[in-house]
Image: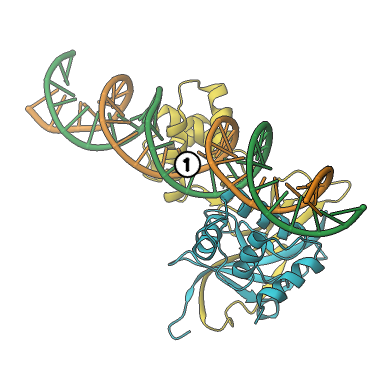
Chain colours: A yellow, B cyan, C green, D orange
Amino acid sequence: MTSATDIKQLLQHHGIQPSVQRVAIAEHVLATDRHPSADQVLQEVQRKLPVVSRATVYNTLKLFVEKGLLRQYQIAEGPTVYDANIERHHHLIDEETGRVIDIPWDAVEVKNVEGLEGFEVDSYMVVLRGRRRDGS
Amino acid sequence: MTSATDIKQLLQHHGIQPSVQRVAIAEHVLATDRHPSADQVLQEVQRKLPVVSRATVYNTLKLFVEKGLLRQYQIAEGPTVYDANIERHHHLIDEETGRVIDIPWDAVEVKNVEGLEGFEVDSYMVVLRGRRRDGS
DNA sequence: CTATAAAATTAGACATTGTCTAATTTGGGA
DNA sequence: TCCCAAATTAGACAATGTCTAATTTTATAG
C-alpha cells in the first residue's frame, strides 16, 4: 500500500513539498518498524535513489518529526532512532540484538502519573529491557 | 559525609584500586544527583585535581558501572549520563532545562509487566517528560 | 514560455561524544 | 630498593550530528 502518490499526498497534507528525495525517504521510513537511525535510512534510501545526500536525510527526518509524521527517540545506547508509530506506546529494548520494539499502550498499565507531586507531566512511556521469548 | 577515606574503602570493597584519580571521580559522581555526563565529570574533577585526563574519566566511569557503583543512562537527547542512585527508580526529563530527575519507584505504579506476551523482561522504568511545578 | 525568487539539496567543514592504542607513570609487594 | 602489573595519559580515530555557503530545482508571476 502507500504508493508513491499516496505518500505525496500525505506529505502535502502535512505541509511538506514532496520532492523526489523526501518521497523516497518517506517511503522507507514510514514502512518499517525497525526504528532505523538516520544513517541507516541514508543507506537504505540510497539503494533506490542514489542522488540523496546525508544532509538531506538528516534535514528531512527532522522536518518529518516537526510536522508530526514521525517520532524520534533516544532510548537505547547509540544514535537517535525514528519511529513511524505516532500513537502513544511503550518500548522494549532487546538486550541481545539492541533492537527497539514497540509495545502497545494497553499492554502494560501505568497508574498515578497525575498524582506525582511537584511535577507537571506532558507524556510518558515505559522502557523495558529484555528479550523475545522463543516462538515469537 | 563520605570522606576521602570512606570513599577509598567503598572502592576497595568493590574491588577497585583507589587511585587518586578514581577517588576524586568517585567523590564527585557519588555526591551529585545531577546526572552528569562524562565530560561534565571531567570538568568538575579537574577543578580539584588538574592531573586527570579525559581517557581516565571515561575508563573510570565505565569501571564504576561494571562494578555496580553507578548506573548509566541514555534517556534524554545528548550524551550518556551517570547516576549514583543504584536503587530502581524512574526518570523525569525536565523539558525546559533538559535535566534528568529521579522519581522514586513507588511514586508511580506499573502493572502487568509480567503478563507481557512474547517477551522476557529483565528491568524497566517509566520515562516521563514534563517540568517542575512552581514551588518545588 | 521565460525569468525570477524562494525552496530544496548538496559537499564538506566542523563539533561533540566516545573508543582505542601505544607509551609512560605509578604503586604494591617480593 | 626493585620489578612488574596496573593505572594513566595524549592523541589518533570513529560515529553521530550540525552548520554554512554554494548549487540546483521548482513554483509561479509576467
Which residue is disc 1 drawn over? A61
**x then y, percent, for residue A17:** 36, 36
Q: Residue at x 48, y 64 (%)?
A: B98
**x then y, percent, for residue A6:** 49, 35
Of the residues shown, which amino acid type is indicated by label 1?
Leu
Q: Residue at x 38, y 40 (%)?
A: A16
Q: Nearer the viewer, residue A28 or B73?
A: B73
Q: Mark yes or no: residue A116 visible.
A: yes
* Chain ID at mark 1: A
Q: Secondary structure at mark 1?
A: helix
Q: Mark yes or no: residue A1 visible.
A: no
Where residue B65 sits, quadrant-wise, is: bottom right
**x then y, percent, for residue A110:** 67, 72
Say whether residue A104 is left or right of residue B50: right
Q: Residue at x 67, y 56 (%)?
A: B60
Q: Nearer the viewer, residue A105 or A47?
A: A47
Say whether residue B135 is left or right of residue B81: left
Q: Say if D29 sits above or below A101 in the image.
A: above
Q: Say if B4 sits above or below C23 in the image.
A: below
The mark total stands at 1
Q: Residue at x 72, y 46 (%)?
A: A98
Q: Say if B131 sits above or below A127 in the image.
A: below
**x then y, percent, for residue A87:** 58, 56
Quadrant where the image shows the N terminus of chain B: bottom right
